[in-house]
Amino acid sequence: MRRERGAVSLEYGGSIAVAALVVALVGGVVASPTVGQAVSAVVCKVFTIGQGECAMPQFESEKDRTPTQPCTTNNNGYSVNGEVAFLNGVGSTSRGVHTEKLSNGQYRVTVSDISDAGVKTGAGWDARVEINGTRWGDDMSVSADGRVRAVEQRTYVVDSKGAAESIARSASFNEVVDGAAETAPGPFGFVAKHVGAPVTKWVGERAGFESLPEPTSTTYLGGASVEASAVITPFVGGAEAKLAGSAVVGVRTNADGTTTVLAEGKATATLSGAISIKSGSIGPDARVIVAATYKGSTLLSADVTTESLGDGTRDVETWSLPVETDADRTAAQNVLYNPLPTAWGDFFDRANSTGDHTRVSYDTSKNTTVQASGDIWFVEGLGAKAGFALPNESVASAEYFNGTNWATWDACKA
């Protein structure tokens, strides 16, 4: 990362780091008959990977339930990634710029830099190209992979499409310049970073690539990921089995003086076979994000978001609870401090009665992903990967819980 990492204070970290353990602990809770109906629903949604019925209980409405926060109606942009492996060491980087159109007419541009490093071991080889999930080439391997991860995100919220396009264009230019400087070898890298990059940006500003404003928020995340996989693809299609998980924690500083502390857990289970040219996956990615927003040491709100990927869709469900009473605070702290969802029932109850509960499904059929790789392993190995993604998502359906039933969220339309 180019900037000095932010640090989560003990005051915040103690209240939310434990939430990252949820991805590892909830699996044993799913079958428990003592889990309340609301908790069962979120557990079902995330950790059974979208399979089965995940109905929420009904609550008495205490206020106008129409969500006050805007939703993302469209998302597009790009990300590029690269990875190098030598012996047992492996490291990768990913950079991207994404622009979201919000339902209130504003635009949100997010610039992301992700890097990780770790250890990989196994046996096999990999020489293939993958486009939107369809593979060409040979890939036969069994491997285990463990890494530590660092993420930096800078977010800009603006009032017009033109302003968003200007920020996205300038951010993309800066990402290319900084990426080239950081990959330059030896002493050339020092010169490229401290002389070449600043001069290139100065010239770019005069060519129309404006300097970026102060971000609306800046997020730093750190964590770890593990993956175990077995793959055999000697022809188009092939077969793959993969189990992976990650957990990260971090802090977001906001321009309004608030601070948001985040914990994210992600699980992936993939099983695909050569029954068609395009591999079919069961058990798509599932992710849960717990967030707490503070003003100084005062807890303002807590949020739980689940996300799962289906066939051409990305489904996002969010529970938001503003902390206005002691009862709200207790319910929120149960989520932040306690890794067991059996203690989260009051949070979901209060989010459904005094907060917001929404679910939005995005059409991802127009997304484009390309990944090329070439490596060989026998305990130790050598290889490289590179690829890019071009998201192009729009709202397929949006609903909010009105206290008794799900209602159409009219403001959240593509």
Image: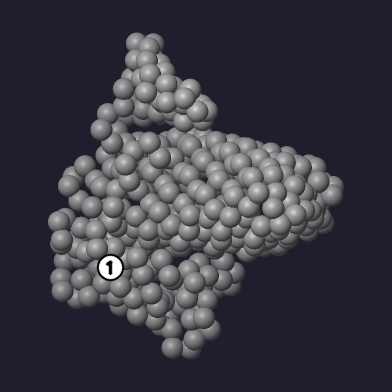
For this rendering, which residue is in front, 1 or 389? Answer: 1
Q: Position of residue 162 (x, y in %)?
A: 36, 24
Does residue 342 show up?
yes
> In the image, 69: left or right of 309?
left
User: Residue sitting at 52 percent across and 81 percent down?
Assistant: 28
Indicate the quadrant where residue 326 lies.
bottom left
User: Residue sitting at 28 percent across and 36 percent down?
Assistant: 215
> In the image, 295: left or right of 64?
left
Eyeballing the image, is 267 above or below 394? below
Q: Position of residue 282 (x, y in %)?
A: 67, 62
User: Which secondary structure, mark 1?
Assistant: helix
Indicate the quadrant where residue 264 lies.
bottom left
Eyeballing the image, is 230 above or below 22? above
Query: Which residue is the site of mark 1?
Result: 15
The tally of labels here is: 1
Q: Outermost residue, front direction?
A: 187
Amino acid type at circle 1 is: Ser
Figure quadrant of the C terminus: top left
